[in-house]
Image (cartoon, rainbow, N blue to C red):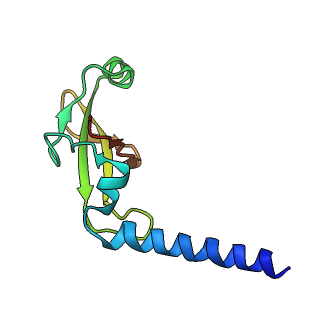
Amino acid sequence: MLVVFLFILAGVAVALYLALMLREVPGFAEQRLGKLEELPPELGKWREDAESEEAARAKAEGLRREVRYTYDDAPSLLAPAGRLTIQVRYRDRETNAIVRAEPDQVEKRRRVKAAG
């Protein structure tokens, strides 16, 4: 019974150590897990989406689909590297008024391992 307790205690200690090191030591996560992929080039700017299937449906309804990426770099417990969010809105082609907007979607950034 004591051995099981010690293994559980060791597991908790290792988990706390890794959580602290990944969160607080600069470069630790990049060295062990790889760098995060680059942010989109036009961060914070609305651009018209003309290629997607949703854009084709919006065009059939007489709407224009616009997309923008926003980045919140304030670290939190669940997102220590910040959050990349996709925002989508639909505008009327004639009046340019915003007709509707989709809920924000959080985009997961992948880690890219260095070659070599």
In-image side of 25 versus 1 (left or right): left
Give the camera-side residue of 68 and 19: 19
User: Residue at the right extreme?
Assistant: 1
In-image side of 95 versus 51 (left or right): left
The residue positioned 36% from the left and 43% from the top of the image is 110
The image position of residue 88, as x and y in percent, is: 31, 41
Quarter occupied by the N terminus: bottom right
Quarter occupied by the C terminus: top left
The residue positioned 14% from the left and 44% from the top of the image is 45
For residue 78, above or below residue 32:
below
The image position of residue 75, as x and y in percent, is: 32, 68
The image position of residue 32, as x and y in percent, is: 36, 54
In-image side of 8 versus 54 (left or right): right
* Residue 74 position by quadrant: bottom left
The residue positioned 31% from the left and 51% from the top of the image is 84
Give the camera-side residue of 54 and 75: 75
Give the camera-side residue of 98 and 74: 74
* Residue 31 position by quadrant: bottom left
